[in-house]
Image (spheres, grey):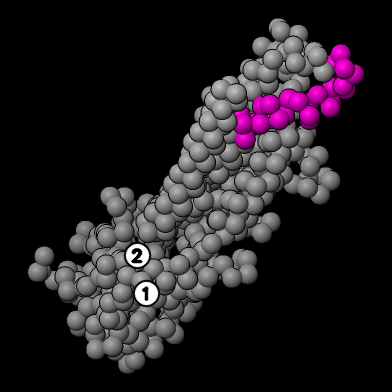
Amino acid sequence: MGIALAVPISAYAQEPDFAAYESAVSDVVADEGGLASIPVDASGIEIDPEGEDALANGAPFDVAGFSRAQKGSNRAIDGAYQGYSYLQGDARNDVCLVAVDGYAVLYVDSGALEERIGSGDRDAGLSWVVAYLQKLDAEAASGSARLKPETPVYVTADESFDLEGEGLRFLFNQEYTSGAFYTSVIGIDGSDVTDSASASYAELRYADFLDFAAWEEGTFVEESSAMDKAGQFLAKLDWSPLWVTLKTTGTAIVLVFVLGLLAAWWSLRIPSRAQDIADSIFTIPMVLPPTVCGFVLLLLLGNNTALGRWFIDIGFPLIFSWPATVLAAVVVSFPLMYRSARGAFEGIDRNMLDAARTLGWSEGRIFFKLMLPLAWSSIAAGTVLAFARALGEFGATLFLAGNYVGITRTIPIAIYFEWMNGNTDVALFWTAVIIAFSFLVILFINLWSRRTTRYRSRRQEE
């Protein structure tokens, strides 16, 4: 551990001053001994507990704000295909790295590096960049692929870099939507590089991002209190998954409540054989895996289907939009509402309903004045359970609506992608939120059931 680590980095352009990096990239040295490098003592790199900031004695600069994107998205962004894109955040980064199977491409902001090293050795500065990345990346990898000392690294100072031998174009610090920056990989010909049939096919592993920093006196900022850390965490947190989830679940539960009651009432009025078929159709989403539900919906409503094209023609594209999150939530939560309502309606004394008919009550009046009040306890419990199911929906939503921040990224989807991107603290926070919601739902059902049981007991005693 005390041995100084030599960090191999690509042999740069012929002239090793940074001006060459503005429009040129380094050539990989393919000799068995590895790549040309300047040895740096990476053993002294110190990382803060959050795994975001690092410093080292002897380094010309420190680094801050490290993040690792384990997965990207291959969906169109704001209506245009930008390639396989990794979300950086709401600001540009001084350093961006994309790891591909067998090599990596490193972008370094020449102005930011020049500001930190002054008249110092630029090649040594770049070696320190790679050293920091290796150390931070090893901490964040959690057993997955990481940047190794022997990994060939292409270096560029251009935000658009073509690796012509591979047919790939790397785009860094791209603001495709207002306030959101991405690093993307796309074929030079505009093709999808994740398509194995493409001539530009590449196995993309992950992306790393960080910024240069200068800590006072070479030490980390004074440790904040737990309350200060919590406040900073909540201030920086992207709250959009919560609002998307509440908006989606609120809309879905209204639709599920109405459709579930109508389906339960209608299914009891058709012949018994037809009831069995209808009941199976209405209940099947409850036993199917959510991914199967999402896949079936995608097959039925995809852009290549007649129904999907019709939605596009009327100016209401359904797939990979917010309405798709509502549809997915409705499909998976509907059976809970339907089964609860049907069970409650079946428990009503049929003689009471027949008596109401003999008094001249219409079917609508019987439903609203008699059936709903008598079955309300079970209907309320079914509504809350359906709400909880819609709240936790993941598989069908991801298939049908995708993962678009602020549009279709619900809390369950945020948990998955934050964890995949190494943001474990954010994933744990959203997990706690879902657990709290689930606890409140179960508590409500228990209190409601106890209240109903006591009421019925008093009525029987009277």
Q: Magenta region's main secondary structure?
A: helix
The amino acid marked with disc number 2 is Val
Q: Is residue 426 placed above or below 353 in the rendered structure?
A: below
Q: Nearer the viewer, residue 77 or 398?
A: 398
The disc at residue 228 is 1
Specify start and end residues of the magenta stretch as a single range.
357-380
The amino acid marked with disc number 1 is Asp
- Where is residue 82 shown, x and y percent of the image? 60, 58
Judged from the image, the secondary structure of the residue bearing numbered disc 1 is helix
Which residue in the structure is indicated by mark 2? 153
Q: Is residue 356 placed above or below 133 in the rendered structure?
A: above
Q: Nearer the viewer, residue 351 or 171?
A: 351
CB-based contact (under 8 Å), mark 2 and mark 1 = no
Q: Nearer the viewer, mark 2 or mark 1?
A: 1
Outermost residue on the left side: it is 2
- Where is residue 174 shown, x and y percent of the image? 56, 68
> Would residue 14 be seen by someone viewing this image from the given angle?
no
